[in-house]
Image: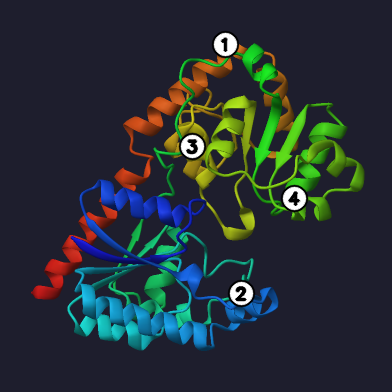
């Protein structure tokens, strides 16, 4: 299929990874990078993001229709695209182009993130919505969606892969040890949770992520735990390799059932200690392919159990990687499911 793919396209964005996967599946992917449709001022960018108005939004919609007229794709794919006008989707439909929205975030969640004004209006105008929560399937149907499919977030096989040859703890120490590692955002109670693991239990906690950690951690903890800066690509992968224990938290404020990070850690062949959830338990066998915890005390207990046990960590990490490959936790398998549903959508529109 020929796909007009619009999203945040940079080497550090998962939208780019999904576009690569579609190409690997043999589709012709024509891209439009929505990052180019933003004002130069950071303050103005925040205003536009919240309201989804202004010349940047107008130009985005105009260029999408121009690209559709020029390229005549079979599918229009919007990856977390918030600035679409409903009339743009209606025009694409009139042109015979099937439209799909891939939305990794929760437009209906309690976090009340800004920026959803136009997106909520768009819901009935897409042919297919792709979401990652059971709750969202019902939310979208109640809002008038034509069709909704649930998939899971995924690892990118060109980025998230195991180290060549085994890394022992001795090699991890040589490369800069990350004993109990968390790479990501400071959502929910993560700053207090990780501080307790370090301060009360004495664990060698290391945090990498955006600068909000320096605000949400107390000064002493920030100095001791925060390495500074977000990690992407090779740096992210190697940090997972160097970590004896890779923590993964459910984002409760986003009503997540599982998280991207868990599949990326498994894809990299890292030892995964993830917050227990039905979504995680359905995708990894506990204590065989990943280790789970509920609450601080159990997390601390699991760290005490596995931090000194290199053999157990390596065995579980290898099994988790094998499960991720076998059951299709990578982008290619997940994108193939969406494409198959899109084929059904296109057939139903012809009937």
- The reply to whether callout 4 and callout 3 are in contact (CB within 8 Å) is no
Q: Which residue is mark 1?
A: 311
Which marked residue is nearer to the observer: mark 4 or mark 2?
2
Q: Is residue 236 rendered to the left or right of residue 283?
A: right
Q: Is any atom of residue 143 visible in this view? A: yes
Which residue lies at the image location 49% right of the left edge and 39% below the top edge? 264
**Which circle's residue, 4 or 1, is located before the other in the chain?**
4
Rounded to the nearest whole Å, what is the CA distance between mark 1 and mark 2?
46 Å
- Residue 234 position, x and y percent, is 53, 37
The picture places residue 96, in percent across and down from the top left corner, at 17, 78
Q: CA distance from mark 3 to mark 2?
A: 31 Å
**Is residue 298 visible to the viewer in this orientation of the structure?**
no
Secondary structure state at the residue bearing disc 3: helix
Q: What is the CA distance from the residue labelled 1 to the residue labelled 3?
A: 22 Å
Callout in the foreground (4, 1): 1
> Label 3: few (<14), some or many (≥20) within 10 Å?
some
Res. 139 mark: none
At numbered mark 4, what does the secondary structure look like: helix, strand or loop? loop
Q: Single out the residue that lies furthest toward the front.
A: 40
> What kind of element bears circle 2?
loop
Q: Quadrant of residue 327?
A: top left
Which quadrant of the figure has residue 298?
top right
- Give the mark nearest the N terminus, 1 or 2: 2
Q: Residue at x 56, y 57 (%)?
A: 255
Which structural element holds mark 1?
helix
Q: Which residue is mark 2?
A: 114
């Amino acid at each position: 299929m020929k796909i007009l793919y619009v999203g945040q396209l940079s080497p550090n964005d998962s939208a780019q990874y999904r576009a690569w996967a579609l190409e690997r599946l043999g589709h012709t992917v024509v891209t439009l990078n929505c990052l180019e449709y933003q004002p130069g001022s950071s303050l103005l960018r925040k205003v536009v993001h919240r309201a989804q108005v202004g010349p940047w939004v107008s130009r985005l919609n105009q260029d999408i229709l121009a690209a559709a007229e020029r390229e005549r794709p079979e599918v229009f794919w919007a990856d977390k695209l918030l600035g679409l006008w409903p009339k743009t989707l209606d025009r694409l439909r009139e042109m015979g182009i099937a439209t799909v929205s891939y939305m990794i975030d929760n437009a209906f969640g309690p976090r009340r993130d800004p920026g959803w004004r136009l997106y909520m209006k768009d819901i009935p105008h897409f042919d297919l919505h792709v979401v990652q929560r059971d709750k969202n399937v019902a939310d979208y149907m109640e809002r008038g969606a034509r069709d909704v499919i649930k998939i899971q977030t995924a690892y990118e096989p060109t980025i998230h892969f195991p180290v060549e040859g085994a890394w022992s703890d001795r090699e991890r120490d040589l490369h800069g040890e990350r004993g109990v590692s968390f790479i990501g955002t400071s959502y929910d109670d993560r700053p207090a949770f990780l501080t307790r693991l370090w301060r009360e239990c004495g664990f060698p906690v290391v945090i990498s992520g955006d600068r909000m950690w320096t605000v949400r951690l107390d000064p002493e903890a920030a100095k001791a735990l925060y390495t500074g800066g977000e990690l992407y690509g090779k740096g992210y992968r190697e940090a997972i390799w160097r970590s004896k224990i890779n923590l993964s938290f459910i984002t409760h404020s986003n009503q997540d059932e599982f998280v991207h990070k868990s599949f990326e850690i498994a894809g990299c062949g890292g030892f995964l200690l993830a917050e227990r959830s039905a979504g995680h338990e359905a995708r990894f066998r506990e204590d065989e392919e990943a280790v789970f915890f509920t609450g601080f005390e159990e997390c601390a207990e699991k760290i005490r159990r596995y931090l000194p046990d290199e053999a157990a960590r390596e065995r579980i990490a290898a099994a988790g990687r094998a499960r991720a490959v076998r059951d299709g936790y990578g982008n290619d398998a997940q994108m193939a499911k969406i494409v198959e549903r899109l084929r059904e959508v296109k057939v139903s529109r012809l009937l």
